[in-house]
Amino acid sequence: MEEIVKVREAFIDDVDGIYNVIKPYVENGELLPRTQDDIADHIRNFVVAEINGEVVGCMAIKFYSKELVEFRTLAVKKDVQKRGIGKMIVNKGIDIVRKMGVKRIFVLTRSEEFFVKLGFEVVKKEIFPEKVWSDCILCPKLNRCDEIAMIKKLV
């Protein structure tokens, strides 16, 4: 049977699936920790990818203003990577925020090439003080951050 990937906005029943997708990335230090309660509190901001009803990828959208959002907590289960699922998730997020009138999307990433293919450009982290003060301040890598800031302007 052919696997069909479905990308959609998340439901409360997806909390455990999202948690299980991000858990390995949290454990190896690639993503900041998120509890199941935190995921549930922000479930309306998540996009998920599923195969046969199983959540295999996710991304959260954090709103900083009516014009600026961050795409974060982007993760795809390792056993289904390299199938375009991450791209599908990001594109769904772009569609969602574009309809809302958002002007700019930013990411902090170690996957520059992935986001360049999706139209993001490298910028200095310092142009996002909102991010630095809300999340980065809590990160153990604060003074030795290895992530690249990137932005996509929506027209």
Image (tube, rainbow, N blue to C red):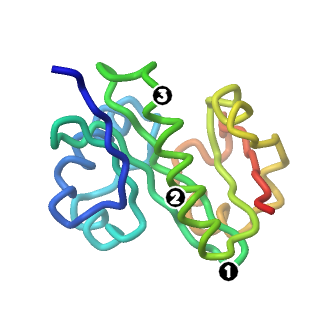
Mark 2: few, some, or many residues within 10 Å (few <14, many ≥20)? few
Which residue is tagged 1? 66
Residue 141, placed above or below residue 134: above
Q: Amino acid type of disc 2? A: Leu
Which residue is tagged 3? 84
Secondary structure of the residue carrying numbered label 1: loop
Mark seen at residue 138: 2
Residue 110, placed above or below residue 122: above
Q: Earlier in the sequence, mark 3 or mark 1?
A: 1
| Residue 68 placement, left or right of 30 | right
Quadrant position of the C terminus in the picture: bottom right
Q: Residue at left 39%, top 60%?
A: 46
Query: Residue 111 sits in which quadrant?
Result: top right
Q: Residue 117: x percent and y percent?
A: 70, 31
Quadrant position of the N terminus in the picture: top left
**Nearer the observer, 4 or 17:** 4
| Residue 133 placement, left or right of 91 | right
Residue 151, placed above or below residue 111: below
Q: Residue 152: x percent and y percent?
A: 75, 52
Query: Residue 11 sits in which quadrant?
Result: bottom left
Distance from disc 1 to disc 2, alpha carbons, whole Å, reads 24 Å
Q: Earlier in the sequence, mark 2 or mark 3?
A: 3
